[in-house]
Image (cartoon, helix red, strand yellow):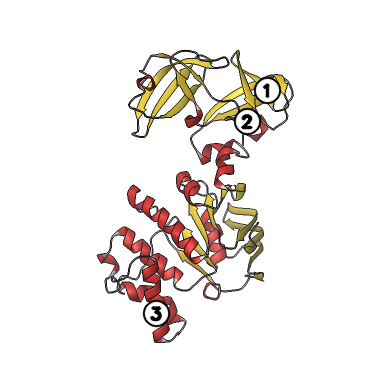
Amino acid sequence: MTRPAIASFRAVSKRYGSHCALRDFDLDLREGELLTLLGPSGCGKTTVLRLLAGFETPDSGEIFLDGRKLAGVPPEARNVNTVFQSYALFPHLSVFENVAFGLKMRKLRGAEIRARTEAALRMVRMEGLGGRRPMQLSGGQQQRVALARALVNHPRVLLLDECLSALDYQLRREMQLELKRLQRQTGITFVFVTHDREEALSMSDRIAVMRAGRIEQLGPPRDIYERPANLFVAQFAGESNVLETTVTAITGPHTLTVELAGTPLLVRTDRKFDIGAGLTLVLRPEDVRVHEEAAAEGGLTGHVLERTYRGVTLDTLIALDAGPRIKASEFFREDAPALDHQPGQRVWVNWTPGWEIVLPHDAKT
């Protein structure tokens, strides 16, 4: 069942001088979801947050929160809080005072301020550290304080602007899990901005892939990864092998034969193509299989260029006889020596028909 919209953008545009940050932008934020805005720098992700928070004003279009137009509503009157990349903690205040700051500005009673501040610190597992100053905390602890300060006000929407980017890899992974836990526990709508695809895929209920001020595709992480709308989405959502081919035969309702530099390949797709049409095959490296000998028809031959050991996987870069290079990523098993192909070795690669992503040439951009 689709959740109701809590906030909406309708035909919103925003320019900064000659740069168009958003153009005719439409988006619904659903009640209680974790939505991620994913895209390259400059695509408009942060502008979406700043407009919803009230830090910027749209040049055209309307923004709604709980059915109310936000035009002219100042930031402090919007039930929206933001966690910034820099955390923006007050260095001269204690952890407790930082978290309680917004409640004091609202002139709540002292007992309620204490109770809600202590509850927020427990929620982010920072109880007992209320007396410390921000400079006495680790980066992860500062992140938790910033989250507590935002959550203590019980916002309708929490905006997170690349707030994990300053953390090291391990701590970042831990905080990803922590954010998911907090979002589920509170039921607050989270809008998370990142350019890290793994972060987006692992955390989100839905992902909006953005480019040049517009949404290229909006949907669940699995749809974004496995059924991308175009080549931009496919490549931004994960590592991709891109092969340009031509349809030579229609062999079934959902099966085509295509040709890559004279080599026939069988592919499956729900899209309709005519014979002679050009199409783009996108293969995820984890779907490519590498063999020392041909095990079936329809594969491609080549030789190994590079091998990279990554602990969990072994990555192989292969120069195909048909022309392009292709990367395979296989789970490493110590009892499978055949996986350990050497540079220069002749190999044969294939994949299960249906695992490829099939795009028409006009969906490349």
- Residue 115's mark? 3
- Please name the amino acid that badge 3 sits on: Ala
For this rendering, which residue is in front, 216 or 184?
184
Query: Does residue 276 appear anywhere in the picture?
Result: no
Give the residue pinned by disc 2.
358
Q: Residues within 10 Å of mark 3 (few under 14, many from 20)?
A: few
- Label 3 to label 2, Cα distance in Å? 56 Å
- Tag 3 near tag 2, CB within 8 Å: no
Query: Does residue 271 appear anywhere in the picture?
Result: yes
Q: Residue at x 46, y 57 (%)?
A: 180
In this rendering, the label closer to the viewer, 1 or 2: 1
Give the residue pinned by disc 1.
256
- Tag 1 near tag 2, CB within 8 Å: yes
For this rendering, which residue is in front, 61 or 239?
239
- Tag 3 near tag 1, CB within 8 Å: no
- Give SS at disc 2: strand
Q: Is residue 117 left or right of residue 205?
A: left
- Please name the amino acid that badge 2 sits on: Val
- Image coordinates for residue 63, horizontal then vertical, percent: 64, 64
Q: Residues within 10 Å of mark 1 (few under 14, many from 20)?
A: many
- Image coordinates for residue 56, horizontal then vertical, percent: 55, 65
- Give SS at disc 3: helix
Q: Earlier in the sequence, mark 3 or mark 1?
A: 3
- Label 3 to label 1, Cα distance in Å? 65 Å
Q: Residue at x 50, y 64 (%)?
A: 158
- Please name the amino acid that badge 1 sits on: Leu
In the picture shown, does residue 197 fall above or below 336?
A: below
Q: Earlier in the sequence, mark 3 or mark 2?
A: 3
In this rendering, the label closer to the viewer, 3 or 2: 3
Q: Earlier in the sequence, mark 1 or mark 2?
A: 1
Residue furthest to the left: 136
